[in-house]
Image: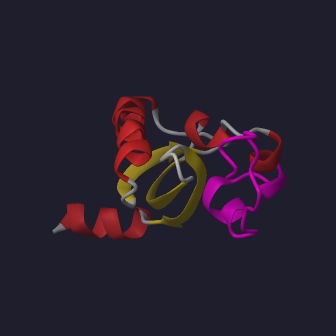
Amino acid sequence: MDVVNQKVLQVSSASGKVYGCAQEAFIKNVQLWLEVVHPDDLKIVESAMPSVTSDGKVMHSDDRIVRPDGSIRWVEAKIKPSVDEKKRLVRLDGVIADSTDKIRAENDL
């Protein structure tokens, strides 16, 4: 994501399988990543965002999302910030994977 221009640069076609919507939806709506976060997890995700901008470290989280059909999935997100020479956030690169089966297996144990 180009943070300066608020533009999603690339979305994997596999995102449709995870999120239950077309990858183009994320390109059209740069805020969709946050809009699908489960309401109970939203404050946790939002509270982690300032640390992404300030320390430059990869952010890692496991959070729930609500798909358009109402089903809930767990996603594991790893997001790496890029900053310019003045340490301003300019880009976010991330990988998101469906971790629902892993979380369910851990909870069963």
- Residue 106 spot, x, y in % from top left: 23, 67
Q: Is residue 83 left or right of residue 68?
A: left
- In this rendering, the answer to whether 13 lies above or below 57 is below
Magenta region: which residues?
1-24
Q: Is residue 93 left or right of residue 47?
A: right
- Tally of marks: 0
Front residue of 56 and 41 = 56
- The question of residue 3 being in magenta is answered with yes
- Residue 109 spot, x, y in % from top left: 15, 69
* Residue in the picture at 64% in, 54% down: 19
Quadrant housing residue 53: top left
Q: Main secondary structure of the magenta part?
A: loop
Q: Is residue 31 left or right of residue 58?
A: right
* Residue in the picture at 34% in, 36% down: 44
- In this rendering, the answer to whether 3 lies above or below 104 is above
- The question of residue 5 being in magenta is answered with yes
* Residue in the picture at 58% in, 61% down: 93
Front residue of 4 and 80 = 4
